[in-house]
Amino acid sequence: MMSGVTFNSVPFWTFCLVSVTGYYLAPHRFRWLWLVLASYVFYGTFDLRILSVLIGLTAFVYGVSRAMDRASGRIRWLLFLADIGVPLAALVIFKYLTFFWQAIRALGAFALGSRPADPFNILVPIGISFYVFKLLSYAIDTYRRKIPAEKHIGYFALYVSYFPQILAGPIERPGDLLPQLRRPVVFDPSVVMVGVRLIAWGLFKKMVVADRLSYYVDEVFLAPQYKSLHLLVAAYFYYVQIYCDFSGYSDISTGLSRTLGLTPPINFNYPYLSRSVSEFWTRWHITLSSWLRDYLFLPIAYSVMRLIKADRWGGITAEGWGYGIGTFATMALGGLWHGAAWTFVAWGVLHGLYQVVSTATHRLRRRWCRAFRLNRVPRIHAALKVVIVFHLVAFAWILFRATSFEHARIYLRYFQFKLPPIGMANLLFDLAVVSVFFGMEYVQRHRQRFLLLDRLPVELKAVGYALFVAGLMTFSVAANSPFIYFRF
Amino acid sequence: MMTPRAGWMRIGRAGLVFVLTLVVLDRAFFAALDWTYRSVERNPELRQKLEGVKNKSAYQWLILGTSRMFEDVHPSFIGQSLGIKAFKEASKGKSLLYNYEFYRLYSEMIGKPRVVIYGLDYFMFGYPSDPGLMRRFGTAGSTAPKPLSLWPPLLMIAHKDANERAVMRILEQLQSRLTSAMGEINPENNVDAMEAYVGDPVSKIVERPAPARFDTVPYSRFPGSEGEYFTKLLRAWQDDGVRVVLVYPPDYIATHRTNFEHDAFIAEVKRLTADCTLCVVLDYGDPLRFPLSTAAYFRDGDYGNSNSHLSKQGVEAFNRVLLPDLKRIAAGYREHSLPARLR
């Protein structure tokens, strides 16, 4: 694991304080330089070699995109291929080379009896999956002439390396971020306060909920045998853990951007309330799923539909083929994006399967709803959907969390409806933590019902914030564990 | 409409309220945590536990160590095989300081043992004894500051690690009470249950090939945080004429590879005990001396996991190797007369 300052550490917050103060003290025309330097220093603390990869890719995509913007015809097309091919090649080499090589050698070992491959010893640049996707969306949008190629290399370098987003997103589009980076920002205490509140909430999610749950979840996943009903609870808790871990990171990242006067996109929108798996993907890691939709799913789906040419093929409409193949391919690649392991691919394919089956059985399910008269009780019907989708997603998370298919099989095999006394204290404590968390999420989601809180005098609000911070200090986990998505 | 000056005044007032409330709440939470911790650690006192031991003179051997000795070496096997009654005081958090204090208390209340079997741990010099467990002696008070002291300004941050350990200890005690309430006895607090315990029947290892990269861990260097108590123990044993067997129990192969300085650690222990004429070091954490790759023999351990314990099946296999060696040592053999594989 590369070392470096992490979001939930004191050195990082000292660094942020210096960065934000320097940003507001610097004249507008030099702010980009200040942030680029801060971002490179931040990224360089992990390893200087990975900083060179980042700078190299940034310079390449900047230069090629500028040339592509001026070119036309076949040259433009070739430049576009280079513009997306080189970052993709870097991603494959650094992150997936061992995975693909071992897969090929495993096939060879199976067919020819040769020796399975040893892994390559390659340093994986942290956050490469995220910034390569940023580079790709920039290259594609420039090629499609949705945005002009950025002339100022400083702003472009800042778009790629912007430190609140470089490790784990949000994967912000160039059309959204670049204009914001150019806009002059005036220090506004109320806006900074919004950012600070978001950061505090993100830290709470990470250090109080996610890290606390990880003790229980790790223990159960480490040794699933004879854990009985704890296996079910750990699957639920892992859902909450990964949600709090990643959305907590996103809140911290967004909060930091807000303190700098920027408005990044929302990355999570209460995904556990989804009524379908498709809806889940519009609420979970929104910047990634919209990236996959725009740059992968839609091109694949349209290509399939164009290939079929007829209205129907094999009894299925061209749109059906386009949707099905597009969904499976996108979700499988989306799974692989999360990590170089077959369990991630299977996790993605399972999500694809959920969505295709859901679409294919839409009419049948509507008929069942009428038969069971669920359509007359829409609230119960909606709650039922939420519960079912929650379980489907939680089940898929087991594959995501397992270290291998064998591990996942053992996990599922030992599940029983019996609660052994071991681990009960942790379970009760974690249940209390999760209940408090969902209670606070409820208040945030239904803000209009708690307007009284907004009308409180500022001194009383200060007491509330102090209570929150004291709770954060008391119940946060001391160990400084990295965010789960930093691995991807 | 508020003037800018009034606005700043208001912000300043709110800031002051925030800071004062935070300091007060910090102290209140700290005091509450400290009080809860003291409440749960009040019982059982060690003196009470040792006073309650029946037929004290029957105990000839004493087993000391951490969770590895709790899982790996059992009085029951020693009794059945060698006909010797052994008292075991071993569990998580019982490092050198605890064991030194316990040895002194045990000598005073039960008598000096003839043989001590001491469990070596890769982290024994750097792993501090649990402060909560230390309170069981009734002499070591809390090292935590008084909640009303003005410095440091935020006690919950300044003592974060200790507070976290207190939370974990409270949960462990709660777990212990829940377990008892559900009809299971914790051997750590019950001498009879400790003597009946023969290991965890389940291997919790999910076998997997060595990953491309995994964290490896160096051993805790002497003297570390509690190394001085190792010296004190050696001196006490020497003065008391106690024969000492320092046992390094087997690690699962993945843990063995994680703890890559195993041989250096054993060499360090041998160097430290070179002057101890009654000490013998038995190292079973070597693939040539015990089948470390048999996953069923181990309860846990993994690549990147520096801690490993034997399963019940592993304990049986291990005792078939350990007991004959212990028998020779108890009979007065010196290290140079032991089988070559142990030297």
Image: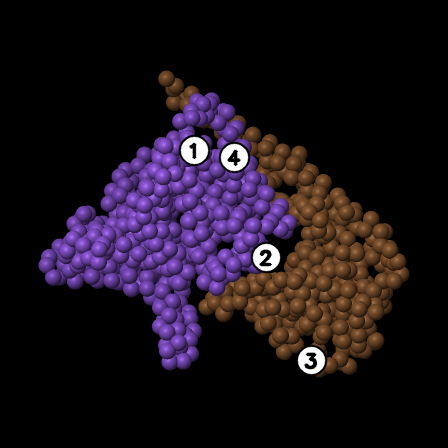
Chain colours: A purple, B brown
Mark 2 — residue? A226
Residue at 51 percent of width and 44 percent of height: A209
Mark 1 and mark 4 residues within 8 Å of each other at the beta carbon? no
Question: Which one is nearer the viewer's eye here, A390 or B31?
Answer: A390
Label 4 – label 2 distance at C-alpha:
38 Å
Residue A51 position in % (x across, y down):
36, 59
Dot 1 amino acid type: Gln
Dot 3 amino acid type: Arg
Dot 2 amino acid type: Tyr
Image position of A365 (left or right of B319): left
Residue B36 visible at all: yes
Number of other residues with Cα within 10 Å of mark 3, as a class: few under 14, some 14 to 19, many 20 or more = few
Residue at 62 percent of width and 74 percent of height: B291
Residue B146 position in % (x across, y down):
68, 38
Q: Which mark is residue A467?
A: none
Q: Which mark is residue A444?
A: 1
First reached walking from the N terminus: tag 1 or tag 4:
1
Residue at 37 percent of width and 74 percent of height: A107
Which chain is indicated by disc 1?
A
Label 3 – label 1 distance at C-alpha:
66 Å
Q: Which mark is residue B341?
A: 3
Asked which secondary structure carries label 2, the reply is loop
Image position of A163 (left or right of B233): left
Q: Are discs 1 and 2 both within one chain?
A: yes
Dot 4 amino acid type: Phe
Mark 4 — residue? A468
Asked which secondary structure carries label 3, the reply is helix
Mark 1 and mark 2 residues within 8 Å of each other at the beta carbon? no
Asked which secondary structure carries label 4, the reply is helix
Image position of A471 (left or right of A276): right
Q: Nearer the viewer, mark 3 or mark 1?
A: 1
